[in-house]
Image (cartoon, coloured by chain):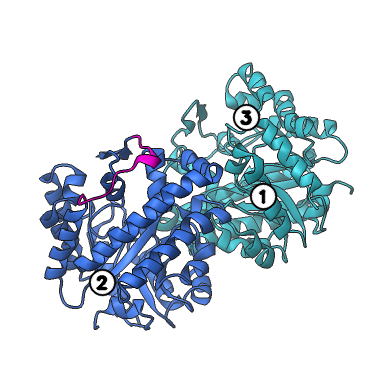
Chain colours: A blue, B cyan
Amino acid sequence: MDKPLLKALAGETVRPAPFWLMRQAGRYLPEYRKLRASAGSFLDLCFSPALAAEVTLQPVRRFGTDAAILFSDILTVPYALGQRVEFVEGRGPVLGPFDPDALEPAGSRLDAVYEAVRLVRASLPENVALIGFAGAPWTVAAYMVEGGSSRDWLQVRRMALGEPERFAGLIDRLTDVTVDHLSAQAEAGAEALQLFDSWAGLLPPAGIRRWCLEPARRIAAALRERHPSVPLILFPRGAAVFAAEFAGTADCVGLDTAADPAWAAGKVQGQAAVQGNLDPMLLVIGGDAMERAARDILSAFRQGPHVFNLGHGVLPMTPPEHVAALRRIVQEAP
Amino acid sequence: MDKPLLKALAGETVRPAPFWLMRQAGRYLPEYRKLRASAGSFLDLCFSPALAAEVTLQPVRRFGTDAAILFSDILTVPYALGQRVEFVEGRGPVLGPFDPDALEPAGSRLDAVYEAVRLVRASLPENVALIGFAGAPWTVAAYMVEGGSSRDWLQVRRMALGEPERFAGLIDRLTDVTVDHLSAQAEAGAEALQLFDSWAGLLPPAGIRRWCLEPARRIAAALRERHPSVPLILFPRGAAVFAAEFAGTADCVGLDTAADPAWAAGKVQGQAAVQGNLDPMLLVIGGDAMERAARDILSAFRQGPHVFNLGHGVLPMTPPEHVAALRRIVQEAP
């Protein structure tokens, strides 16, 4: 196993730190925009194996990242369960009404995703690892219940805290589907898996434990059984105070932008690899500000396993040359 | 000094814990909606001393809270500096364009706020303390630069991280104005002061230290000099990982909904009083779920100075009778 990402996820201190970025494929890249223009809807693109594979590979070719992350979307799961999902330009995802008690079986609706995984894996450079992913049950449930993105997420918070039995049914169902979805990606060739819990920070502590940490534990345990050699990265955004608890469950914890690396080096890195956590806005800005912040992160995590990444996804207005510069900074760090 | 809130803020372990709620005055109260309907614009209401005082007192009368918090808005400060500020129904605040280098002197534009403080203080029951407040410089700057609320706050994040010298000018100016504004409230009769940094969590660690913690230190130092007996509460929302650092600066740290009370009891409460942190959604839901969560918080903070509060403001759909029930729960807690 010579891939730097997999070594770091196995607990090795690898230098230079392996490098990839959340949302490294996408709108900020001209080659993506060109392909996107000819691809129909966003979901059509996600479900076209050859196109999704090509988009996945674009940043690997351009920047020489240590990982490819499958180009897909966390809302493929509600779509597979029969909920209407559309991506509306300038507005984000719009989901149809749904009945938590009448979700359909996913069946073969996600097969195109696994085919994309196979295609990417077959064309990756030998040092580059392929990461599969899924939205965490809480975060996927949030979009399902709200019918899209939201400023305050009142409906899903109300359901989680006020109707816990009913909500548990939805979370349990999503937990099972997520295990299957990640497992199928591993079978198709994904060498590491990441669970995105983008909205963990909306919950109070008891909610984070019940709706984020507990499902993450169940998913981790099931995957460990089915795919013992495929490491799992958890990314509970907005819940940095709980990062040490998540670390006990996974091979790696992704840190959000607000997490303090010095704190995480002490509290989290001893239990698991850490991933993160440059502010994506610094990647938009570039120059000295970006370099200083990146070096501070590298320096804080120097003593243990660390995967360099952002604390959130690449922003659409990011100049691609800043990503290339960041890649060099990480490559050449002392 | 017999007021329970002031004892707790001075570091005493007071039981029952003093009780007040962020946004305890406002839209969820029928008596507020009635008064609001006859009061012109939202800013007109903030700048009408008798009406603002009446609104401030409504929840004190209804629930017997241990504190009144002045009814006002953090955007009175940009208004006083000459920026256009409007509150548009269903959309929130809308601010006009502004030039950070050409802000006007606040002059007497905030005098009506201080008059409201005097009126409230004169009519408060003897055990109830009056809290004055201001937005923290980072949070006020965020609204000023974005021209209102925002989903991603890209412009202010970009300015803070990419044009730090220019942004420092704005923050310095807001820091000075905030000191004056809080100080004038103390002179008018406010017995404690709270600094709301609602958007601290948008920044990376170096930004939290520079744009949130450092101005908070300067504000705290200046107020300590001018009003040594008036305690200061800091509320850096979304930056719980830094709560212990904020605690070194203030008499009390307000904890947001995601902060773990058991963690904060160990890391924060030893250095300062803590305030918080029930999820406001639990106040909407009420019943056993609310009671359990409130008791857990009270129990975690039992050994030291604690002010019971929410982790964020009261939500507009909150049933007032749930607030009354919560008040009883805190009053009767063992």
Residue span colored magenta: A97-109
For the residues beneath circles 2 and 3, the answer to whether they share a chain is no
Q: CA distance from mark 2 to mark 3?
A: 51 Å
Tell me the amino acid under the disc marked 1.
Arg
The reply to whether callout 1 and callout 2 are in contact (CB within 8 Å) is no
**Vertical comparison of B222 with B65: above or below:** below
The reply, left or right, for residue A329 in relation to residue B309 is left
At a point 44% along the width and 65% down the height, the residue shown is: A217
Tell me the mark number nearer the camera, choosing from 2 and 3: 2
Q: In this figure, which residue is indicated by the disc labeled 3?
A: B28
To which quarter of the image does residue B287 belong?
A: top right
Tell me the amino acid under the disc marked 2.
Glu
Tell me the mark number nearer the camera, choosing from 1 and 2: 1
Q: In this figure, which residue is indicated by the disc labeled 2?
A: A191
The reply to whether callout 3 and callout 1 are in contact (CB within 8 Å) is no
To which quarter of the image does residue A290 belong?
A: bottom left
Q: Tell me the chain of label 3.
A: B
**Where is residue A245 drawn, in percent x and y?**
52, 68
